[in-house]
Image: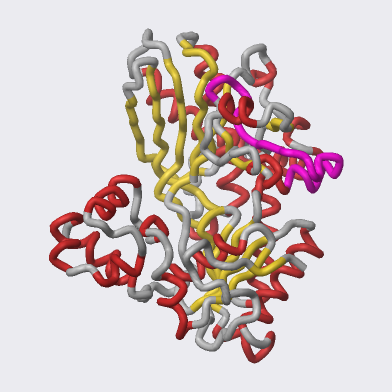
């Protein structure tokens, strides 16, 4: 199953899936082209074809691309128009985030069958600490193989795994194992693995930092590790230089944190053409609130702060927020608050993007709702929970608010954000 992956050019090629895993108790598991793979799973006729998931309008952005599409240069976050020009024969699909959330929960459940120390980083990747699982499941390499086999057999998806002594190196390993592979970086060979890599491999090195390091003649991780500390401080500042120095020496003390929780859940939409019509704005905000509410309920979370983001045609961006008396996961309450915030903004300016977000999250069980005198026993939350069950069985198109069925309700693309 799968394959091992060698280092990029300039590195020692003798790293693979069967290395010495003593001391390598950190796994980074990353699903392969996750959104696209979920779409291919339910549409087997697409297997082997280039598949691109994302906004399909003129301002759309690629969320995920199959490896067949990536051979044409298509990448995540690329404008859809550019992807179409690179790969005109690709199958372009609008995202179905309910399906991806369901697949993510199933995959994370497989990870937790091995160890409770699972730290999700996003819907399609997680760190695992398997130190305590060795007695039951064997060496870290054997645990990684077990996870990959379970994901393939149970979910009909593939993943790539990095096995290392630290989180940073494990993530680098999974990246270089893609697709459908595994890479073990022995603890005593960490620097041998790291030092030939380009400086951009270091966490925190973006375009500006990369340029600053290259101006100093530093192009590899090893050169950063050997650089005089004062030179790095002068170029990057105290905090950034200290951070990169530690990583360049293979030091990353962070533990896997299973209690990591999302700080917010939101969604936003960029319109294909700028919008002035308040009815369209409200209908769009309703659709976004429905998605956010569903994601909150699926995650078992409620939030106390509702915020909106509006970007106008001149790219001026405005954000507003309001704290609720009671935390909520109800789309109707999210919409009501969001619309109140939106209506006090510039009413005539053309809108390019609108988004809504719920923040200050807590577990639903930890935030009981305060009863209000005269409130109906069964209200919007019960209705929306019932709708969730219908959607889970029959798909999102089975239940939609009536106002979303009006013409113009689908003339935009969604950008999920969490």
Q: Is residue 378 above or below residue 347?
A: below
Q: Is residue 217 above or below residue 394?
A: below
Residue drawn at x 19%, y 62% as measured from the top left: 232
In the image, residue 47 lies in the stretch drawn in magenta: yes
Task: Tell me where residue 22 sits by quadrant.
Answer: bottom right
- Looking at the image, residue 354 sits to the left or right of residue 139; the answer is left
Give the percent coordinates (x, y) of residue 266.
49, 39
Of residues 58 and 362, which is closer to you in this image? 58
Of residues 190 and 326, which is closer to you in this image? 190
Of residues 69 and 239, which is closer to you in this image? 69
Residue drawn at x 42%, y 67% as measured from the top left: 196
Task: Tell me where residue 93 sits by quadrant.
Answer: top right
Give the quarter of the figure containing the N terminus.
bottom right
Residue drawn at x 46%, y 30% as measured from the top left: 355
Q: Is residue 378 above or below residue 228?
A: above
Give the percent coordinates (x, y) of residue 178.
62, 59
Task: Tell me where residue 114 sits by quadrant.
Answer: bottom right
Residue drawn at x 66%, y 69% as measured from the top left: 4
In the image, residue 305 lies in the stretch drawn in magenta: no
- Looking at the image, residue 233 sits to the left or right of residue 353; the answer is left
Give the percent coordinates (x, y) of residue 145.
70, 75
Number of labels in the image equals 0
Residue 118 visible in this rendered orientation of the protein: no
Give the percent coordinates (x, y) of residue 161.
61, 67
Query: In the rendered view, how is the structure colored?
Result: secondary structure
Query: Which range is magenta?
Result: 38-59
């Amino acid at each position: 199953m799968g394959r091992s992956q060698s280092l990029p050019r300039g590195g020692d090629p003798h790293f693979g899936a069967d290395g010495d895993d003593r001391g390598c108790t950190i796994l980074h598991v990353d699903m392969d082209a996750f959104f696209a793979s979920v779409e291919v799973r339910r549409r087997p006729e697409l297997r082997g074809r280039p598949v691109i998931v994302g906004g399909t309008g003129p301002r759309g952005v690629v969320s995920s691309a199959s490896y067949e599409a990536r051979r044409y240069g298509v990448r995540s976050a690329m404008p859809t128009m550019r992807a179409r020009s690179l790969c005109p024969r690709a199958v372009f699909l609008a995202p179905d985030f309910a399906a991806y959330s369901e697949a993510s929960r199933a995959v994370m459940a497989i990870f937790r069958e091995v160890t409770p120390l699972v730290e999700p980083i996003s819907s399609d990747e997680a760190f695992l600490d398997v130190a305590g699982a060795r007695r039951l499941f064997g060496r870290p390499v054997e645990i990684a193989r077990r996870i990959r086999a379970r994901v393939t057999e149970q979910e009909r998806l593939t993943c790539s795994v990095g096995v290392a002594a630290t989180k940073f190196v494990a993530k680098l390993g999974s990246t270089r194992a893609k697709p459908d592979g595994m890479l073990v970086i022995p603890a005593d060979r960490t620097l041998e693995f790291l030092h030939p890599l380009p400086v951009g491999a270091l966490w925190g090195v973006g375009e500006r930092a990369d340029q600053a390091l290259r101006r100093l003649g530093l192009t590899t991780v090893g050169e950063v590790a050997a650089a005089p500390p004062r030179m790095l401080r002068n170029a990057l500042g105290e905090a950034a230089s200290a951070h990169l120095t530690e990583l360049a020496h293979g030091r990353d003390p962070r533990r896997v944190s299973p209690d990591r929780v999302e700080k917010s859940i939101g969604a936003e939409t960029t319109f294909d053409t700028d919008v002035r019509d308040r009815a369209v704005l409200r209908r769009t905000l309703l659709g976004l609130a429905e998605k956010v509410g569903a994601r909150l309920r699926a995650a078992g979370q409620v939030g106390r702060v509702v915020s909106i983001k509006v970007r106008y045609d001149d790219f001026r961006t405005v954000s507003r927020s309001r704290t609720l008396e009671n935390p909520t996961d109800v789309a109707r309450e999210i919409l009501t608050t969001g619309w109140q915030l939106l209506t006090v903004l510039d009413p005539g300016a053309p809108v390019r993007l609108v988004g809504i977000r719920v923040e200050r999250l807590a577990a639903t069980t930890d935030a009981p709702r305060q009863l209000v005198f005269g409130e109906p026993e069964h209200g919007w939350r019960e209705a929306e929970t019932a709708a969730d069950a219908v959607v889970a069985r029959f798909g999102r198109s089975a239940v939609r608010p009536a106002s979303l069925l009006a013409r113009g309700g689908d003339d935009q693309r969604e950008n999920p954000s969490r």
